[in-house]
Image (tube, grey):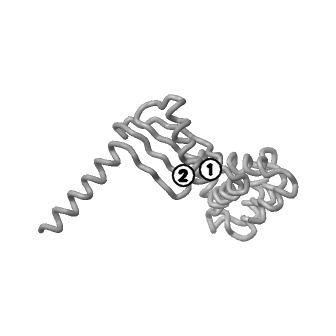
Amino acid sequence: MALYEVAKKERSVEEAKQDLTSIAGIFNAQPQLQNFLASPLVDREKKLDLVDKVFSDRARPITMKLLRLLIDKRRETELLAVREEFERIVEEAHGTLPVLITSAVALDKGKLDQIVTRVAQQTGKDVIPEVEVDPALIGGVQVEFGNSILDGSVSGALKRLRERLFIDVFKQA
């Protein structure tokens, strides 16, 4: 991705990542802004003016160039996908892996470290854990990273059992 290469050259990868995250947050908080930029009825110049007014004091020049380029190429709606891809490239380049660890109850440090170590061994990457508590899991843990979900939760086991029973019922019918 060109943005990563330019940011790397300028030694501003983390800053570009922060900008994209901040802009995505604004888009998510202000859906009307996203709708305005996505509208084919709105003139390109009006979109550029709005982006300059809203983001010029919040984003670095490299990020502003990206926003303007997306508008020029009529790819305004791709900003969130660009952010996700940029983050993936940065994580890959740095050998890091964000991991979402969800448990039914709060995990103690020892258990969390055990999960992080296991995922790090499995993937060969430095794990950056994000921990959430979801009582709906009933018990156990779900671990999500990349395109993988390791579901060791009670609710997941019940769901798999329900699906298996459902399939067995139809096989007999």
The numbered dot on residue 97 is 1
Please tell me which of labels 1 and 2 falls first in the chain.
1
Answer with the quarter of the image where residue 58 lies. Answer: top right
Looking at the image, is 20 positioned above or below residue 110? below
Looking at the image, residue 40 sits to the left or right of residue 70; the answer is left
| Residue type at tag 2 | Phe
Answer with the quarter of the image where residue 84 lies. Answer: bottom right
**Few, some or many C-alpha atoms within 10 Å of disc 2 (few <14, some 14-19, many ≥20)?**
some
Looking at the image, residue 139 sits to the left or right of residue 1; the answer is left
Nearest to the observer: residue 125 or residue 147: 125
Looking at the image, is 49 positioned above or below residue 152? below
| Contact flag, marks 1 and 2 (Cβ < 8 Å) | yes
Q: Residue at x 76, y 49 (%)?
A: 55
Looking at the image, residue 144 sits to the left or right of residue 94; the answer is left
Q: Give the labeled residue for mark 2.
A: 145
Q: Residue at x 56, y 56 (%)?
A: 146
Q: How many angstroms separate mark 1 from mark 2 (CA)?
A: 7 Å
Answer with the quarter of the image where residue 113 lies. Answer: top right
Q: Residue at x 64, y 51 (%)?
A: 125
Q: Secondary structure at mark 1?
A: strand
